[in-house]
Amino acid sequence: MIYSSTRDWSAASGKHVLLFGMSGLGKTHLSNMLRDAGDWFHYSVDYRIGTRYMGEYISDNFKREAMKNPFLRELLLTDSVYIASNITFDNLAPLSTYLGKPGDPDKGGLPFADYMERQMQHREAEISALKDTVRFIDRARDIYGYDDFVCDSGGSICEVVDPDDPEDELLTLLSETLLMVWIEGSGAHTEDLVTRFSRAPKPMYYQPAFLEACWAEYLDTHALTEDKVDPDDFIRTTYARALAHRQPRYEAMARNWGVRVSADDVARVTGPDDFDTLISRALETRG
């Protein structure tokens, strides 16, 4: 790890951390808090995905829908209107909407094959955005003068790495430049996370084998054809299963590549000093 002890962390002239874990447990809360304090650069992986790597997919999807409306169609064809997403660190809805949900088209569902294609686009974008993290550390320092750097990773990071492989390319790259910090939830958080996801879905990438198994089981259990699946119910059910699926992957990432902190402790952090203390304790516990 880039910091192997509390002493290393305290003495570092520039502190670099990558926060990972399920969406809704405090990654963006911590990142916003550190950025707002004025000394930290906040790099959002999901924002980078939605702007740099999938921005064109997203805007093309908007335009495709607009072309179905005769009024907007004419304006688009004459370059009279400009359509783009307004994605922000705190509002990732344009990306979530593009990724979509499989199922009944009358309920906004996509054919499963199209959904899987968008999933693979997300996978490639996630890997690229994570690799960009290292360059943005230098960019933040050289252009803006920030020595401290926090990477607010997406909840899907554990799906694009092999945490038990000591030679995993992406984890090796990241751990050489950032301290990997798992925000660990408890069973008490699960119901709340599912409820929050149902209300405002976050961008999610699932491994193909996991997703295909969930889809096949859902079709069989509910005796449905693809075009009759309730997209919201399927995504909600799949997300709940993903919580259990991802837990051991996150745990392996923390065990082999970084440290862990509890979501309850994260919720009590109110400033950079509290954050320093949180990380110092995590390093002490690991040591």
Image: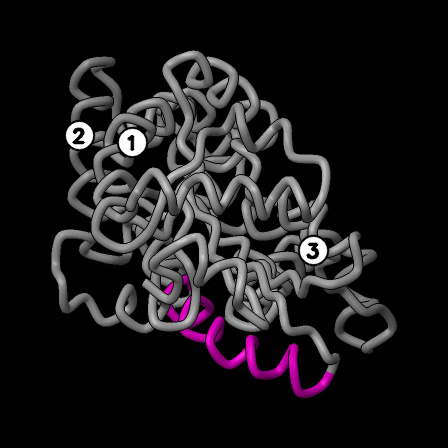
Q: In front of the other: label 3 or label 2? A: 3
- Quarter holding residue 222: top left
Which of marks 2 and 1 precedes in the sequence? 2
Q: CA distance from mark 3 to mark 2?
A: 33 Å
The residue located at (65%, 61%) in the rendering is 42
Question: If the image is split into quadrants, where does the N terminus sit?
Answer: bottom left
Q: Is residue 103 left or right of residue 53?
A: left
The amino acid at mark 2 is Ala
Q: From the viewer's perspective, tell me whether residue 55 is left or right of residue 168.
A: right
Q: Are marks 1 and 2 in contact (CB under 8 Å)?
A: no
Is the residue marked by circle 3 packed among few (<14), some (14-19), or many (20+) residues within 10 Å?
some
Does the magenta segment cover residue 60? no
Q: Which residue is mark 2?
A: 216
Q: Secondary structure at mark 2?
A: helix
Q: Residue at x 61, y 28 (%)?
A: 267
The answer to whether the residues at label 3 and label 1 have Cβ atoms under 8 Å apart is no
Q: Quadrant of residue 212?
A: top left
User: Label 1 to label 2, Cα distance in Å?
Assistant: 10 Å
Disc 3 element: loop
The residue that label 3 is drawn on is 87
Determine whether, in the image, residue 286 is placed left or right of residue 54.
Answer: left
Q: Is residue 141 magenta?
A: yes
Looking at the magenta stretch, what is its main secondary structure? helix
Question: Magenta region: which residues?
Answer: 126-143
Foreground: disc 3 or disc 1: 3
Residue at image mark 1: 226
User: Where does residue 210 sit, x and y in percent of width and height?
Assistant: 20, 39
